[in-house]
Amino acid sequence: MSKIFALAGVVIKELYRRKDFYVLFVLTALLTLGAGMVNFFHDDKIVRYVKDICLLLIWVSALVISVVTTARQIPAEREARTIFPLLAKPVSRAQVIVGKFLGCWLATGVALVVFYFFFAVVTGSKEHFWPWAAYLEAVWMHWVMLGVVIAMVLLGSIYFAAPSSTSTITIIVVGGILLLGTHLKIIALQQPEPMQFILTLGYFVMPHLEWYDLRDFVVYDMGLVPVRAVALATLYAAVWTGIFLVLAWLGFRRKNLTT
Amino acid sequence: MKISPLSMLAVLGALAFTLSASLALTADNWSGRAKSDNVFGMMFGDGRKLFANHFFTMADVYFHSGYYPSVFDQRATEEKEIISASHGHKDSEEDEKNEDFLGKPKDWVDAFGRNFRITQHTHLENHNEREILPWLRLAADLDPQKTEVYTVGAFFLREHLNRPDQAEVFLREGLRNNPDSYEILFELGRVYHDAYHDLDRARNVWQLGIKKFMVAPADRQKDDKLIFEELVVNLARIEDEAGNYGAAIDWFHAAQKVSPAPDALQKQIDAIQKKMAALIPVTPGKLY
């Protein structure tokens, strides 16, 4: 376990040494503050559009950070040939996969805490209301969802040729699930066979990442999602994370690292 | 021939300055964008109108606190509720039923997924209606010819947020961009009548609205009968309030020609006629 945490620690250090997080945070902060300063009809109590914009930017930034950070982990180790001394420690290939996953997931969690704290400060200063429980629930669900994404990217980084292709494909897949996941069944029912069957199958076997998007509950102050549903969704995400990590390990186990 | 890089740079710089000075005036006329009086016009040209409808829809989404059908969901009515609300429409049980676009869960994925979606049909209230205003402002900036943005915004500012001053400013802006809009004139009349109780200005604005309606193209007149009826009925009521019963009856008769419920208007005419009858002095009969 200590080897896994040591690997994870390296990944976390890498995140705060690189500029990705800082650039995206500053961009999010500037756009949110800019939007917040606009005055509509001399009414300074209007706040939901600021929440909406800020949360959208947080979601985009967190997705980019998690995907880009994860996609380069294993290819960078192979390219720099540091994977060989790492595996000679000895560290098993399974431990490399889990360590890299844990590092990326924890690093993304740290970034999420910073982003959501900024969100709470900015929107709270406008509406003088801090629904911390709703925020915590939103952060937790967001983080759990990113766990699935990170595991998916790790799997992609084993099979795809370069980090850029892994990042692009994963962002398209995750974006597609987030946008169409809920509606895929409706779309399927409007299609002729065999498309209807293929889409329905996809609907049932894909990870439903759209469940983890609680932005509407935060933006419209709609209270909390039942804790039981959050717990079940967490379990569902853990299962999908496990599936992707096992597939990544199976691929990495047979991977020729010299090329 | 050898030319030093510095002198080449100086020549090119001089040439660029000369060309920019000579072309500056004519370049302004190459594109209509530079003439646009708002930043969106300069950035997107006429393409900005595509986004205006989206932002207007966003206002309706906010009005429903996120409970809103996507492009994939089927909905019975296409009209946005912020528009019908601005015409005084209140949801009946039948309307609520029609707006339940989710229906029963289709499968376990859908059923479980509803824990994480807003599934209650609500409308903003208690001054929270202000949250739709940024989207209306953006829609107006993107498409200044979209008259319903001004009328809906002004309605919520006047009726729900108690800001008739801002409603009037917004409508005046709309009127500058759409000088022939009888919809905006109707809403402006409501600001004068309902908020300021200024009958004369309300009457003038509504009468101007009717004039604009009369010179509008026939197809627009056909589509906007409801607005015409609202203008005429409100004018009739204003005349009734002012004691000009004859004019009030005339306006009600005009409204009857386009109204889907002329009998209801007839009852109002009858009520006014009763008031008129009560005003006619009774000639005393011979006592002896």
Image (cartoon, coloured by chain):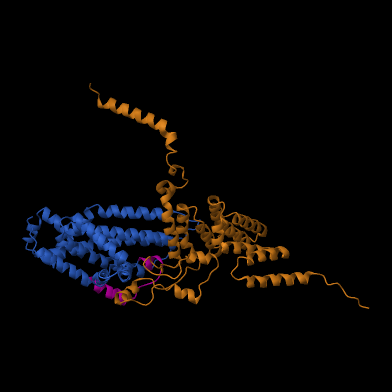
Chain colours: A blue, B orange
Residue bounds of the magenta highlight? A215-237
Q: Nearer the viewer, residue A17 or B26?
A: B26
State the image coordinates of residue A108 (x, y, percent, origin top left). 25, 61
Residue that lies at the very extreme toward the top in this rendered image: B1
Which secondary structure is most common in the magenta stretch? helix
Q: Nearer the viewer, residue B212 or B45?
A: B212
- Which of the 4 image quadrants contains residue B72? bottom left
Q: Is residue A128 left or right of residue A138?
A: right
> For the point 25% across and 64% down, which residue is it?
A146
Residue A232 forms part of the magenta stretch? yes
Q: Is residue B122 left or right of residue A93?
A: right
State the image coordinates of residue B65 (x, y, percent, origin top left). 43, 67
Q: Taking the image as drawn, is residue A162 in sight?
A: yes
State the image coordinates of residue B8 (x, y, percent, origin top left). 28, 26
Image quadrant for the C terminus of chain B? bottom right
> For the point 42% across and 70% down, which residue is it?
B75
Residue B185 forms part of the magenta stretch? no
Tell me if residue B16 comes above or below residue B263 in the rendering: above
State the image coordinates of residue B198 (x, y, percent, origin top left). 65, 59
Tell me if residue B265 comes above or below residue B16 in the rendering: below
- Which of the 4 image quadrants contains residue A66? bottom left
Q: Is residue A138 left or right of residue B54?
A: left
> For the point 39% across and 32% down, which residue is it?
B20
